[in-house]
Image (cartoon, helix red, strand yellow):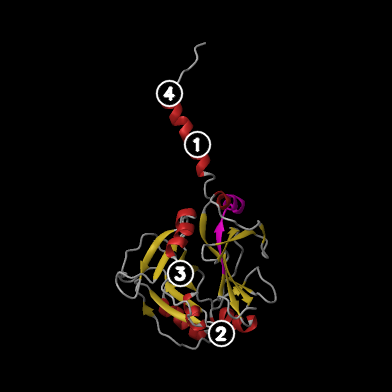
Amino acid sequence: MKRLLLPVTVLVALLSCSADETRVGPARPPITGIALVVIRVSDPKTSLDFYGKELGLGTGRCGGPDSPCLAVSGSQLVALDRNVSPSSSNLMEVFFATSDVVGLQRYLIAHDMQPGEVGLSENGRRTFSVRDPEKHVIAFMEFQPDEVHSTPSQVSARLIHAGFVVRDRAAEDRFYKDILGFHVYWHGGMKEGEDNWVDMQVPDGTDWIEYMLRVSPDASHKTLGVMNHIALGVPDIHAAQQQLIKNGWKSTEEPKIGRDGKWQLNLYDPDETRVELMEFKPTKEPCCSPYTGPHPGPAQ
């Protein structure tokens, strides 16, 4: 039998390929969207009137007496956590959904991150957390939809983004963009050529996080409540406004079209944390930059 001899150049190429694969490490499991957002509140019972009655969100499977949980949908939750430190950020934690929690933890370790141990959340899903470069607590949770029965009073059934203050965009990009695979969905600001907001869309879905840039280091509690926020998607902002009024909400602002070309309406919980209602699609051309990813909501 003749032995197959490969040219030296082919052998070098094969060895280089194997070395590259070893260096790259494990592939990143899918990250499909936002699964849970934890918001700090001073009084969970009072906050339940806002999230449960005015927004019409139902009861979700997570939390406890001091951290009640509300269901936006069968796969998205909002938990209210009692704030034991008045100086801390109101937006406590953002959980992203993935089909492989253990694989994603290994992936982050391979990229020199230091994620926590995988454990079980209060609703029985595997999860772990890690801090991004600016010490925001980011967590990952296995996707496992629950059966949720919406009510006629529910204003929205979709959490589309969460925003938080970012000081160093480049450092955050190295984590969200270079390691996790997020990409810019839209960016813009109050002035042309100046970014105040950068929307970073998850790699395998349509939800996003929003970098809130150019925020003063000594920003007030009220300002931080505006910046650290969540957004609920709606197909019709004016219909959503009428449902809010039926639910007992006292109007403080009117709907408007944002710089991103989408109708929006801002609400504030008892601790001045902003909850933004936003239409899924723009109704006019956005300022500053085009959209580079699919919009959330019904099929485009």
The spot of residue 115 in percent (x, y) is 60, 57
* Secondary structure under the numbered disc 1 in the rendered image: helix
Q: Residues within 10 Å of mark 1 (few under 14, many from 20)?
A: few
Q: Residues within 10 Å of mark 4 (few under 14, many from 20)?
A: few
Mark 4 or mark 1, earlier in chain:
4
Nearer the camera: disc 1 or disc 2: 1
Q: CA distance from mark 4 to mark 1?
A: 17 Å
Q: CA distance from mark 2 to mark 4?
A: 71 Å
Who is closer to the viewer here, 39 or 54? 39
The spot of residue 141 in percent (x, y) is 60, 59
Residue 1 sits above or below residue 272 on the image: above
Residue 193 forms part of the magenta stretch: no
Mark 1 or mark 2, earlier in chain:
1
What residue type is disc 3 on?
Arg
Identify the image quadrant of residue 215.
bottom left
What residue type is disc 2 on?
Pro
* Secondary structure under the numbered disc 3 in the rendered image: loop
Q: Residues within 10 Å of mark 2 (few under 14, many from 20)?
A: some
Q: Which residues are magenta?
A: 93-106
Q: CA distance from mark 1 to mark 2?
A: 56 Å
The spot of residue 168 in percent (x, y) is 45, 66
Residue denoted by label 2: 270
What residue type is disc 4 on?
Val
Residue 19's label in the rendered image is: 1
The answer to whether residue 298 is visible is: no
Who is closer to the viewer here, 231 or 218? 218
Q: CA distance from mark 3 to mark 2?
A: 27 Å
The spot of residue 285 in percent (x, y) is 30, 69
**Residue sitting at x 46%, y 87%:** 251
Residue denoted by label 4: 8
Residue denoted by label 3: 167
Q: Quadrant of the C terminus?
A: bottom left
